[in-house]
C-alpha cells in the first residue's frame, strides 16, 4: 500500500478519496436526517442527462453535469416545498427522464466512444488534478456553511415549523442544502459513479445516526467511516485489480451489515442479562 | 363582553392579536369562515371544538405559517410571521424522527435560537441554566441528558412545553398540550400556566373542558366559525353546536348530561349562527 503511494495517480486518488469523505460525511448526514435519500437518488440519475449534454455539445464534463443537476435539483426542491404529497412521483419521473436524456444524447453524439462504465461506477484512479482543486474548494465551502449555519440546520431538520417561528430563513436554507447536494453528487460521481453515489452518501450516516448524541458527532463519525471505506476500497482495488468504486461501496456494505449484526446481537444479549 | 363588542373599556389592556374577518380554505374546502377574534394582555383563553374544526389552522395563521384566504391578522401590531419570536408555540404533532441525534437539553435549547446570534456568540451557561429550569418546571429535568427519541410521548410533550417556555414569550399558543399527559401532569401543568398567566397571555387548545373551566378566563369555540365566551362557563347547548360526536371523540354533551360542570356559559348571541 505504502509503495503504491509513490505513483502520482495513487496520490491523487487518495487526496480525492479524503476530500470526498469529508464532503460525504457532512452532506450525507444532512441527507439522512432530512430524509431526502430518494431526492438525492433523483439528482444523481438526472445528472446523467447533464453528462449527455456535455458530450453532445462538447462542454467540459463538470460544467454540463453541475449545470443540469442544479437545475433539476431546484425543480425538485420547489416541488418538495409546494406540493409535498406529489414529491415522490415527480422525483421518480425526473429520475428516469434525466437518465433517458443522457443516454439519447450520447446516442446522438457523433463518434461517441466514452467509457460508460466510468460514469456508472466512477474512476477515482484517473481523477484529474483540476477536479481535486474543485473538490477542495467545495469541501471548504461546505465546511464554512456548515459551521455558520450549524444551529439553523439542526433546527430546520428537526422541526421546520418551529425554526420558522424563531426566524430561521427555512426556505432559503433548504434551497441552499439542495444546491450543495447537487454539486456534491456530481463531484462524487467521479469517485464512485452514479450508481453507487447514494450508498457512499448514506451508509456512514445510517451507521452513525442512532449512536450519536449530536449532529456534530454524527458528521465526524460519518467522515471517519467514509475515509475508512475509501482507503480500504482503494487498497482492495489496487491490490486485486478491481473496480475502485465498487470496492469502496462493498467495504461500506460489509461494515454496514456487520454493524447491524453486532447491534442485534448486543440487543439480544442485553435482553437476556 | 366589554372586551368583545368593540368598545374596550379597559384601555390599559394591550391588544396582542387582532383577527378581522379571516377565512381560510384548503383545496376548495372551507376550514375557517369569517373569524373575528382578539387576544389581550393577560388573557387566558381555552380554545375548544371538534376535531377538524380548524383550531390548529387558526394557530398556524397567527404564527404566519399559513396565509389567510381573506381577512387580516395583526400580531403585536405587525403582519403574522414578523413578530412570531414573541410567541411561544407548542405544536400538536411534532414530527417524530425517533433516531434524530439530539439530546433533550439540546431540543429545549432550540427555544433560544436566534438567527442573528450564531452559536459561538451565545451565552451558553445562562441558556443552559434556563433550559434546565424549564425542564425542572415540567418535571423532566432528569431526562436532560437522554436522547429525545428515548422518551415516552408524555415526556416528550413536556420537553416541547419547556422549549416554548424558554423563548420568554409574551403570548403562549398551546395546541392540545395536555393530550398525552397523565392526570397529575395535567393539573400540575394547569397550575404552572395559571402562574405564568400573571405575565403571559395564553391561548390553549384543549379537550379537557372540565379541568380547563376552572382555570381559564374565557373560552373560544371553533368549528369553522369562532364564538367567544367571556366567562369560562359551559352550556350543553353550546357544546352541542360546537361538537359533533365522532368515534374517537368522547362527546362532551354526554358529560354535561352527567352533571359534571358547575358553571354554565351564556348562550351564543342571537345573530351568531353556524351552518
Ligand atoms: N395539510 C392539510 N391538507 C388538507 N386539509 C387540511 C390540512 N390540514 C388541515 N386540513 C383540513 O383543515 C380542517 C381543520 O383542521 P385542523 O385545523 O387541524 O383542525 P383541529 O386542529 O381543530 O382538529 C380539517 O377539516 C382538515 O381536513
Ligand atoms: Mg388540531
Image: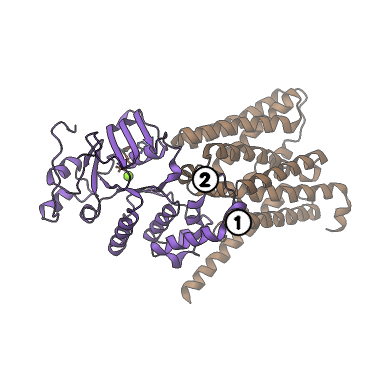
Chain colours: A brown, B purple
Asked if labels 1 and 2 share a chain, the reply is yes
Measuring 83% from the left and 50% from the top, which residue is drawn there? A11
Q: Is residue B230 left or right of residue A163?
A: left
Q: Is residue B8 left or right of residue A151?
A: left
* Kind of element beneath mark 2: helix
Measuring 60% from the left and 62% from the top, which residue is drawn there? A259
Q: Quadrant of residue A256?
A: bottom right
Which residue is at the front of the view, B155 or A59?
A: B155
Residue A214 seen in this snapshot: yes
Tell which subunit mark 1 falls on: A
**Above or below for B66 versus B133:** above
Which residue is at the front of the view, B263 or A257?
A: B263
Residue A147, how many percent across, how many down?
64, 49
Residue B148, how many percent across, how many down?
47, 59
**Above or below for A230 versus B31:** below
**Above or below for A57 versus B135:** above
Q: Quadrant of residue B35?
A: top left
Q: Identify the residue position indicated by label 1 in the image.
A: A218
* Kind of element beneath mark 1: helix
Q: Identify the residue position indicated by label 2 in the image.
A: A156
Measuring 74% from the left and 39% from the top, which residue is drawn there? A118
Q: Quadrant of residue B15?
A: top left
Q: Quadrant of the N terminus of chain A?
A: bottom right
Residue A89 seen in this snapshot: no
Q: How many marks?
A: 2
Please tell me in which quarter of the rendered image ligand 1 is found. top left
Tell me how far mark 1 sits from mark 2, CA to CA.
Answer: 17 Å
Q: Is residue B260 left or right of residue A37?
A: left
Which mark is nearer the camera, 1 or 2? 2
Residue B123: which numbered mark, if any?
none
Q: Earlier in the sequence, mark 1 or mark 2?
A: 2
Tell me the crowding category of disc 1: few under 14, some 14 to 19, or many 20 or more residues within 10 angstroms, Cα based.
Answer: many
Amino acid at each position: 500500500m505504502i509503495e503504491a503511494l509513490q505513483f502520482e495517480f495513487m496520490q491523487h486518488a487518495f487526496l480525492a478519496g479524503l476530500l470526498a469523505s469529508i464532503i460525504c460525511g457532512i452532506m450525507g448526514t444532512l441527507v439522512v436526517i432530512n430524509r431526502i435519500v430518494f431526492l438525492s437518488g433523483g439528482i444523481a440519475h438526472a445528472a446523467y442527462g447533464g453528462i449527455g449534454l456535455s458530450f453532445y455539445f462538447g462542454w467540459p464534463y463538470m460544467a454540463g453535469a453541475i449545470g443540469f443537476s442544479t437545475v433539476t435539483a431546484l425543480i425538485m426542491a420547489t416541488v418538495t416545498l409546494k406540493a409535498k404529497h406529489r414529491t415522490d412521483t415527480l422525483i421518480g419521473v425526473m429520475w428516469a427522464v434525466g437518465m433517458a436524456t443522457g443516454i439519447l444524447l450520447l446516442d446522438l453524439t457523433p463518434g461517441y466512444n466514452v467509457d460508460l462504465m466510468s460514469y456508472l461506477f466512477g474512476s477515482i484512479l484517473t481523477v484529474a488534478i483540476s477536479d481535486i482543486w474543485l473538490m477542495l474548494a467545495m469541501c471548504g465551502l461546505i465546511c464554512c456553511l456548515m459551521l455558520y449555519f450549524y444551529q439553523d440546520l439542526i433546527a430546520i431538520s428537526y422541526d421546520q415549523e418551529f425554526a420558522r417561528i424563531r426566524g430561521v430563513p427555512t426556505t432559503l436554507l433548504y434551497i441552499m442544502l439542495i444546491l450543495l447536494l447537487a454539486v456534491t453528487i456530481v463531484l462524487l460521481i467521479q469517485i464512485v459513479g452514479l450508481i453507487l453515489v447514494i450508498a457512499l452518501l448514506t451508509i456512514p450516516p445510517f451507521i452513525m445516526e442512532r449512536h450519536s448524541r449530536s449532529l456534530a458527532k454524527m458528521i465526524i463519525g460519518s467522515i471517519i467511516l467514509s475515509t475508512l471505506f475509501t482507503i480500504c476500497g482503494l487498497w482492495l482495488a489496487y491490490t486485486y485489480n478491481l473496480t475502485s468504486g465498487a470496492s469502496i461501496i462493498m467495504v461500506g456494505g460489509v461494515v454496514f451489515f456487520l454493524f447491524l449484526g453486532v447491534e442485534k446481537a448486543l440487543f439480544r444479549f442485553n435482553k437476556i442479562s | 363582553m366589554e372586551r368583545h363588542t368593540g368598545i374596550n373599556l379597559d384601555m390599559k389592556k394591550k391588544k396582542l392579536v387582532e383577527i378581522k374577518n379571516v377565512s381560510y380554505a384548503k383545496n376548495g374546502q372551507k376550514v375557517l369562515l369569517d373569524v373575528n377574534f382578539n387576544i389581550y394582555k393577560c388573557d387566558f383563553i381555552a380554545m375548544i371544538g371538534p376535531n377538524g374544526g380548524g383550531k390548529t389552522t387558526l394557530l398556524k395563521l397567527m404564527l404566519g405559517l399559513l396565509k389567510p384566504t381573506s381577512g387580516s391578522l395583526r400580531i403585536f401590531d405587525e403582519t403574522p410571521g414578523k413578530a412570531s419570536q414573541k410567541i411561544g408555540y407548542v405544536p400538536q404533532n411534532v414530527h417524530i424522527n425517533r433516531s434524530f441525534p439530539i439530546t433533550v437539553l439540546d431540543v429545549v435549547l432550540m427555544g433560544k435560537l436566534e438567527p442573528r446570534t450564531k452559536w459561538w456568540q451565545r451565552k451558553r451557561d445562562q441558556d443552559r441554566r434556563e433550559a434546565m429550569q424549564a425542564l425542572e418546571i415540567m418535571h423532566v429535568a432528569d431526562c436532560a441528558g437522554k436522547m429525545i427519541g428515548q422518551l415516552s410521548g408524555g415526556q416528550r410533550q413536556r420537553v416541547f412545553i419547556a422549549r416554548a417556555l424558554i423563548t420568554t414569550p409574551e403570548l403562549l399558543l398551546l395546541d392540545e398540550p395536555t393530550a398525552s399527559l397523565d392526570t397529575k401532569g395535567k393539573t400540575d401543568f394547569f397550575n404552572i400556566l395559571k402562574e405564568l398567566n400573571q405575565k403571559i397571555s395564553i391561548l390553549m387548545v384543549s379537550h379537557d373542558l372540565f379541568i380547563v373551566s376552572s382555570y381559564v378566563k374565557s373560552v373560544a369555540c371553533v368549528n369553522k366559525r369562532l364564538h367567544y365566551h367571556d366567562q369560562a362557563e359551559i352550556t350543553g347547548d353550546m357544546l352541542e353546536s360546537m361538537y359533533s360526536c365522532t368515534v374517537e371523540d368522547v362527546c362532551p354533551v354526554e358529560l354535561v348530561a352527567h352533571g359534571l360542570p358547575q358553571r354554565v356559559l351564556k348562550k351564543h348571541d342571537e345573530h351568531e349562527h353556524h351552518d
